[in-house]
Amino acid sequence: MSSKAEVKLVHNRILESLPAAERRQILRELEIVELPRQTSISRAGEPMTDVYFPETCMVSVVTTMRNGSCVEAGVIGARGMAALPVILKSEEHLLDSFVQVPGRAGRLSADTFRRASAPGTALHDLSLRYASIFLQQVARSAACGAAETEKERFKRRKCFSNRW
């Protein structure tokens, strides 16, 4: 899928930022997938088997509270990737993530991503920078959640009630 994938998947900032040779190598392995709303990307307590590079979809990362309610911790779109546990070499994800806005993404197996993002590669460096930015987004989300009124928190939780 090298040339077709490159033409189809041009709106993901991480992939666009790679040097041409590294990008071509990844695009050979990349599968273009259409992701319907509520497609599970990762489940808490389970290993992440695939990494996603959203192009037109949006992925919500949520944490589930003891009482069963969910709170969105972060959002992943065309400027990022759903890969944090793989980047950080975690055996399993501690959060759930699912497609909130349907659309297209590139998908790599976690093993392929690990090989492609070995130390010394541009993907390795971009992945670590992205992980840092995503963690900052999660921290901001937590701060905003703490400042919201109970009514505002309820409205935000309600949008995830269909999923969980």
Image (cartoon, helix red, strand yellow):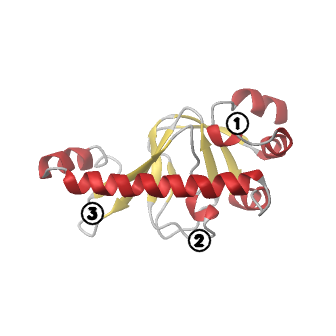
Residue 48 pos. (x, y %): 59, 62
Residue 125 pos. (x, y %): 69, 55
Q: Is residue 57 depicted above or below 93 in this figure? A: above
Mark 1, residue position = 16
Tell me the element at label 1: helix
Tell me the element at label 3: loop
Mark 3, residue position = 68
Marks 1,3: beta carbons within 8 A? no
Dot 2: few (<14), some (14–19), or many (≥20) neighbours within 10 Å?
few
Dot 3: few (<14), some (14–19), or many (≥20) neighbours within 10 Å?
few
Residue 72 visible, this orientation: no
User: Callout 1, which amino acid?
Assistant: Glu
**Which circle marks residue 90 in the picture?**
2
Q: CA distance from mark 2 to mark 1?
A: 26 Å
Q: CA distance from mark 1 to mark 3?
A: 38 Å
Residue for point 46% across, 53% down: 97
Tell me the element at label 2: loop
Residue 93 pos. (x, y %): 51, 66
User: Callout 2, which amino acid?
Assistant: Ser
Residue for point 36% across, 53% down: 140
Residue 158 pos. (x, y %): 24, 46
**Which circle marks residue 143 in the picture?**
none
Q: Is residue 163 left or right of residue 151?
A: right
Q: Earlier in the sequence, mark 2 or mark 1?
A: 1
- Quadrant (top left, top right, bottom left, bottom right) of the N terminus: top right
Residue for point 82% across, 46% down: 22
Residue 76 visible, this orientation: yes
